[in-house]
C-alpha cells in the first residue's frame, strides 16, 4: 500500500499544495484531509497515516502557533521534510455576485492577516470571519444558504468549489510565502544532502543573565548559522519560555552535533525535531561563509589529536 499523508484540509488548501509539492503524483486515497493542524498531529502520532503536512511559518504573519505548540508539547514527532509555497490570495464568491455585494468574508486567520490592507481599501464595510482553513472558507461560501458572501482562498480552492474570483492577487505583500513541514514518527533521519536544516526546542535550565547568549554561543562558536529563533511560552507560568531554533546543517555534521551536545549540557531539556533537506533559499538566508576550522575534517582532526595526547602520544 502506498504511504498515506494527512494534511490541513479540505482539498484546495495551501497545505495540500505543499503536500503535492513534496509528493508529486500522490493519489486522492493517499492524501487524508483533516479539519485542523492538531488533528494532523493526532493521526501521525496514532500511526493512522505515515506522515502529515502542516504550515509552520509565513513570511508575513510569522509562526503558526498550533503547529509550534504541538511540536513543543506532547508525544514527540520528527520533521522529515519541508516545502516553501508562494501564497497568492483570491477573493471568490458564488456566481452572479459582484464585489459591491460582499458584506461577510471568511478565511483562515493567517490569510486574513495577509490581506487586511486590501480589504480595508476595497471593502471597508465588510465583516470578516475566521475559519479552519482558506479552502474551508471556499467550501462554506459554496454551500446553499452560506453564512458568508466571499472567501479569501487560493485560486485552486475557488475553482474546486465552483466559486468565481472577484479579485486576484489581493495579498498585501506580493512575495508572501509559507513554509510547511512534513511530520513523521521518530525513526531513521533523512540522509545529509549538504543543504540541510535542523530544528530543535531548547528549555533553559534556570533564568539568569546571559542564559540566551550561552545558548546562542553553542552555535556561534562552531560556525553554525541559525535561520529561525522564536521564543514560545512553555505553558508552566508567566515568564517561562522555551526557544524554537532552526539551524543550517544536519545533526550528522560535526559542528552541529557538537553544538547540540553543548546545548544538552547547559539546558534543562532539548527536544530534537529533526534534520531534513532545505526546501530552497527562500526558507532561509543564503548559505553563509563558515568561519575558519569548523568543517567535519577540522573536527575529525582535533578529535584524533585529543585521542593521541590522551594516550600519551606526541601532540
Ligand atoms: O488555509 C490554508 O489554505 C492553509 O494551508 C493554512 C495557511 C496558514 O496556516 O498560514 C497556509 C498558508 C497561508 O498563509 C494561509 C493559511
Image: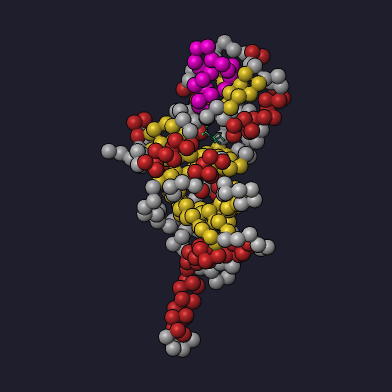
Q: Is residue 269 left or right of residue 48?
A: right
The question of residue 134 being in magenta is answered with yes
Q: Is residue 38 above or below residue 290?
A: above
Q: Is residue 139 left or right of residue 127?
A: left
Type of colouring: secondary structure
Query: In the rendering, at what x and y percent does residue 44 appear?
Result: 39, 41
Query: In the rendering, at what x and y percent does residue 245 appear?
Result: 56, 53
Q: Residue furthest left?
A: 1
Q: Residue at x 47, y 80 (%)?
A: 306
Q: Is residue 130 above or below residue 267?
A: above
In the depicted view, which residue is nearer to us: 120 or 166? 120
Q: Residue at x 44, y 37 (%)?
A: 40
Q: Residue at x 35, y 34 (%)?
A: 30
Q: Is residue 211 above or below residue 177?
A: below
The boundaries of the magenta stretch are 133-151
In the depicted view, which residue is nearer to us: 257 or 201? 201
Query: In the rendering, at what x and y percent does residue 229 appear?
Result: 60, 52
User: Splitting the image into four quadrants, where does ligand 1 fall?
Assistant: top right
Amino acid at each position: 500500500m502506498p504511504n498515506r499523508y494527512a494534511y490541513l484540509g479540505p482539498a484546495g488548501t495551501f497545505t495540500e499544495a505543499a503536500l503535492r509539492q513534496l509528493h508529486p503524483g500522490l493519489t486522492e486515497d493517499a492524501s487524508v484531509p483533516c479539519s485542523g493542524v492538531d488533528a494532523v498531529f493526532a493521526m501521525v502520532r496514532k500511526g493512522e497515516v505515515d506522515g502529515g503536512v502542516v504550515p509552520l511559518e509565513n513570511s508575513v504573519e510569522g509562526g503558526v502557533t498550533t503547529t509550534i505548540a504541538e511540536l513543543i508539547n506532547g508525544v514527540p514527532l520528527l520533521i522529515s521534510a519541508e516545502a516553501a509555497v508562494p501564497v497568492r490570495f483570491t477573493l471568490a464568491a458564488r456566481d452572479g455576485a459582484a464585489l459591491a455585494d460582499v458584506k461577510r468574508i471568511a478565511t483562515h486567520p493567517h490569510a486574513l492577516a495577509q490581506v487586511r490592507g486590501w480589504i480595508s481599501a476595497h471593502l471597508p464595510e465588510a465583516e470578516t470571519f475566521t475559519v479552519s482553513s482558506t479552502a474551508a472558507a471556499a467550501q462554506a461560501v459554496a454551500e446553499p444558504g452560506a453564512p458568508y458572501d466571499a472567501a479569501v482562498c487560493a485560486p485552486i480552492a475557488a475553482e474546486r468549489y465552483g466559486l468565481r474570483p472577484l479579485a486576484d492577487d489581493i495579498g498585501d505583500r506580493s512575495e508572501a510565502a509559507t513554509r510547511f513541514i512534513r511530520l513523521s514518527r521518530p525513526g531513521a533521519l533523512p540522509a545529509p544532502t549538504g543543504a540541510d536544516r535542523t530544528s530543535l526546542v531548547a528549555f533553559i535550565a534556570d533564568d539568569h543573565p546571559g542564559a540566551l547568549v550561552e545558548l546562542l554561543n553553542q552555535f556561534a562558536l562552531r560556525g553554525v548559522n541559525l535561520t529561525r529563533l522564536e521564543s514560545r511560552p512553555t505553558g508552566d507560568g508567566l515568564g517561562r519560555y522555551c526557544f524554537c531554533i532552526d539551524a543550517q546543517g544536519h545533526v550528522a555534521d560535526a559542528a552541529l552535533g557538537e553544538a547540540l551536545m553543548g546545548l544538552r549540557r547547559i539546558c534543562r531539556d532539548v527536544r530534537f525535531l529533526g534534520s531534513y533537506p532545505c526546501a530552497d533559499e527562500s526558507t532561509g538566508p543564503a548559505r553563509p561563509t563558515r568561519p575558519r576550522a569548523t568543517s567535519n575534517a577540522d573536527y575529525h582532526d582535533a578529535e584524533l589529536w585529543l585521542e593521541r595526547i590522551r594516550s600519551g602520544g606526541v601532540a
